[in-house]
Image (tube, grey):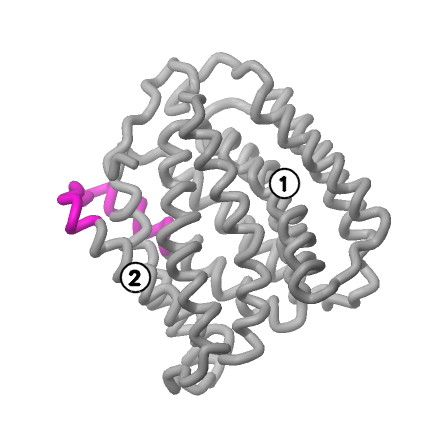
Amino acid sequence: MNSNPPRPEPGSAEIRGPAQYAAFAGMCLIWGTTFLAIRIGNEAIAPLWGATLRQVLGAVLNLTVALAVRARWPKGSALGGIAAFGFLNLGVNFVLLYWAETTVPSGIAAIIYATMPLSTGLFSAWMGLHPLERTKMLAAIVGIVGVALIFSGELGVGAPPLAMLGVLTGASCAAFSGVILKKLPPQSTFVVNGLGSAIGALVCFAASTVAGEPHAMPRTFAAWGPILYLAVAGNLGAYVLWAWLVSQWKVTSVSVGALIIPVIATIAGALVRAEAPAPLTYVGAALVLGGVAVALFAPAGEARGNA
């Protein structure tokens, strides 16, 4: 994968080929399992401290690759945009998600994140990135109906409303950060995620300190395993794929991955923790997959602005 990828010129169509679809599938598969990994990790180490260690490792891994491939380093407004991405997505979003997953099941957290396509579309239109496309927005609504059915079926787990609101707020921050990143000139995905993870680590550490968490280094595999998986597969894997896709597709197209991730998260929970999905979950999953298919494979509308 080119560390300084090309981006479609204003007015051009999205770049859609086997590499882009493979990256999209890989991103969804990884993120569909990270919610479960966070939940498992929270049982072995203080959540925000675990998030801090993950982000430190993610920063080291991404910046090491960036130096190895001699990636260009951002300056000026590009650096400021990356800093905003790191603060909102890898900082505030992670603080809220890790805290919420101490009480919210991983599948429910992933389901709430399926609101991202809608919020991304609204943020994109608000910031003049590109207008709302009727087909993609209708597809997102169909997917959200599916998510609502999944949520209804899984409501019996009794997740607290305040924690679920925290997840929703984090998802909105992540959606907004994606729009900010899309408006920047092309940047190395490794630099973006390396600097973003470093900033995110500072935010997570500050929140951990305010929360009074212990900051002892983990001593067991149960504590280190999820952190290592999340840093390598998440920060160096999924986030790099996501940043590359943002340079290839409209950010609203990339964001529809948030509709399929809850399906994967539900399956992962069932396989690893023997969680039995409710019957409505399967109906909702079918709608989610249908919404993703329409959003991804429908003919792209005329691009405008920085699309």
* 68 inside magenta stretch: yes
Q: Is residue 127 found left or right of 247 in the rendered image?
A: right
Majority SS type along the magenta span: helix
Quadrant location of the N terminus in the rendered image: top left
Q: Please give the count of numbered marks on the rendered protein.
A: 2
Q: Give the range drawn in magenta.
A: 66-86
Q: Which amino acid does label 2 sit on?
A: Ala
Please, is residue 252 above or below residue 167 in the view?
above
Where is residue 25 shown, x and y percent of the image?
51, 38
In the structure shown, which secondary structural element does the residue marked by tag 2 occupy? helix
Residue occupying the far right of the picture: 279
Q: Which amino acid does label 1 sit on?
A: Leu
**Image quarter for residue 133?**
top right
Name the residue that disc number 1 marks: 259
- What residue is drawn where x is 52% and y is 32%? 252
Where is residue 307 shown, x and y percent of the image?
41, 23
Give the number of the disc on residue 198.
Answer: 2
Give the number of the disc on residue 100.
Answer: none
How many residues crowd mark 2 within 10 Å: few (<14), some (14–19), many (20+)?
many
Compare residues 121 and 159 and report the one nearer the observer. Answer: 159
Residue occupying the far front of the picture: 271
- What residue is drawn where x is 37% and y is 83%? 217
**Mark found first going from the N terminus, 1 or 2:** 2
How many residues crowd mark 1 within 10 Å: few (<14), some (14–19), many (20+)?
many
**Image quarter for residue 134?**
top right
What's the distance in space between the residues labelled 1 and 2, CA to CA?
28 Å
- What residue is drawn where x is 81% and y is 59%? 155
Judge whether residue 128 can be spotted in this image.
no
